[in-house]
Image: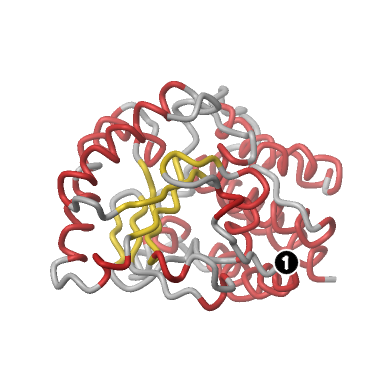
Amino acid sequence: MNAALPPDVASAIRSYLRVADRVLPGGIIACAVTGSIALGAYRPGRSDIDLVAVIADECRTRPDLLRRLRLLHLSQVPRLVVGAARGRGVSACCNTVFIAESEVGRPVTEIPPIASHTGEIFDPKGAFDVNPVIWKELVDGGITVRGRPIAEWEVNAQPETLRPWVSTNLREYWTPLAAQLRVRPSSTPGTLLRRLVTSPRGLSAGTVAWCVLGPARMHHTLATGEIIGKEEAGRRALTAFPQHAPITEVALAKVRGARIPSAPSRRQWRGLTASAMEDIIAAALD
């Protein structure tokens, strides 16, 4: 295992790949770490472990491939449960996107993912993380944990699509999510995150962190072309958007595992988060 990995990450990945080799022998022929670890922003017990796994072409046509990948995902449930009990959430397990060996060198926007899993969710049809942002992380700082070095993968991250992709993501995901915060709390159906932002119980600090720091990261990428982690994005947001410092400090405290500030009060979090998101998104797209 790569010496550059934090010990807890190396242990989690070793365990994950051992299970993979049992449920799909010879299946995963290459694997690399992206996300906060690739960005140098990993925080033990709080950051998740993001992987890109390459499936051998001879396994691609197996009729039971998805069932076996689902079993691999289920192997993470005990870690997820323990992590959730300790307040760590998906940081306790590996979140993986699976692509075929013959697709690795294709432009990232043209790669058809085999499947993916994040936390408790298994997607048998796609993978959001097969996109220009994650592929830039892979090229710039990805860490190989199996197979050839990433430099030999001949990855095509399509840098010319990075800013257009981020702009679209801001318009199609983050803008509607900010609007949801303006809706009176209810138990309306939808994705887990949409249920969280409309919960009558109010926002959690984790949801505040996601909603504020996600657009802040996108803002920086559109301005500079670089990818940064949540904490650095929060620090930059304090300078760029000082009017939203109180709610940004809540988000940063959650990311850092620090004590959540007593002010602003939790009943103010929804409105403050919505305002911060709206201003950051507007500035990013300006």
Q: Amino acid at mark 1?
A: Pro
Q: Helix, strand, or loop for circle 1?
A: helix
From what the image shows, is residue 186 above or below residue 96? Answer: below
Q: Total of numbered circles in the picture?
A: 1
Instruction: Give the x, y percent position of residue 65.
Output: 20, 65
Q: Residue 37 appears at what percent x and percent y?
A: 56, 37
Residue 110: image location, x then y, percent: 53, 78
Q: Position of residue 57 (x, y in %)?
A: 32, 67
Position of residue 106 in the picture relative to residue 72 (left or right): right
Residue on which disc 1 sits: 159
Query: In the rendered view of the protein, which quadrant contains the N terminus?
Result: top left
* Residue 251 as seen in the image, left or right of residue 52: right
Q: Quadrant of residue 81?
A: top left
Closest to the observer: 68 or 31? 31
Query: In this orientation, which residue lies closer to the viewer: 82 or 275?
Result: 82
Write the residue at 46% across / 49% down. 202
**What residue sits 31% from the left and 35% below the top?**
84
